[in-house]
Image (spheres, helix red, strand yellow):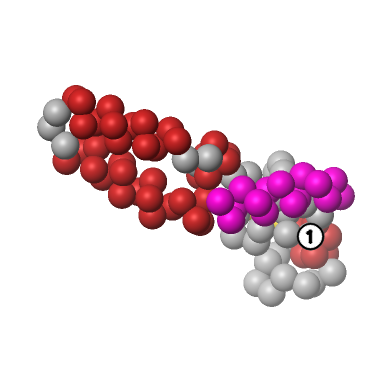
Amino acid sequence: MAKKSLIQREKKRKKLEQKYHLTRQFSKKEICRVPSLSEKRKIYVKLQSSPRNSSPTRLRRRCFVTGRPRANYRDFELSGHILRQMVETCLLPGAIRSSW
């Protein structure tokens, strides 16, 4: 189980990213439209003035059950060992254990 402080930090980053998503997207489109370098520089300064944690690259996918940050499956939002346990106990419909 991940530390609760790390999970809360990740939730805070997600809220910040959602809050600044439209402004970041608008300024990035504006940079492409503007031909002069001085105006582009002003837009870059505006982009850089937003909080660091509002960047989507700072987000980390975590396991829904344990909060583990590594070995996550996007489809299920679960880490590998939790996914394996749930498949063995038939809690995930349609998932089949492989055997060969």
Q: Closest to the observer: 84 or 25?
A: 25
**52 sits left or right of 38 in the view:** right
Q: Closest to the observer: 83 or 3?
A: 3
Residue at 67% across / 54% down in the picture? Answer: 11
**Residue 38 seen in the figure:** yes
Question: On screen, 95 above or below 33?
Answer: below
Residue at 30% across / 35% down in the picture? Answer: 43
**30 sits left or right of 25 in the view:** left
Instruction: Estimate the x, y position of residue 45 in percent, counting from the top left.
Output: 36, 31
**9 sits left or right of 48 in the view:** right
The quadrant holding residue 69 is top right
Residue at 21% across / 31% down in the picture? Answer: 39
The quadrant holding residue 74 is bottom right
Secondary structure mostly seen in the magenta stretch:
helix
Q: Which residues are magenta?
A: 1-16
**27 sits left or right of 63 in the view:** left
Instruction: Estimate the x, y position of residue 12 in percent, counting from the top left.
Output: 65, 51
SS for dot 1: loop
Q: Closest to the observer: 16 or 84?
A: 16
Instruction: Estimate the x, y position of residue 75 in percent, counting from the top left.
Output: 59, 60
Instruction: Estimate the x, y position of residue 1 in percent, counting from the top left.
Output: 86, 50
Task: For label 1, count other residues whose C-alpha is less than 10 Å away and answer few (under 14), some (14-19) or many (20+).
Answer: few
Q: Amino acid at mark 1?
A: Val
Residue at 34% across / 32% down in the picture? Answer: 44
Q: Which residue is mark 1?
A: 65
Magenta run includes residue 76 = no
Magenta run includes residue 2 = yes
**Residue 79 seen in the figure:** no
Residue found at the very far top of the displayed protein: 37
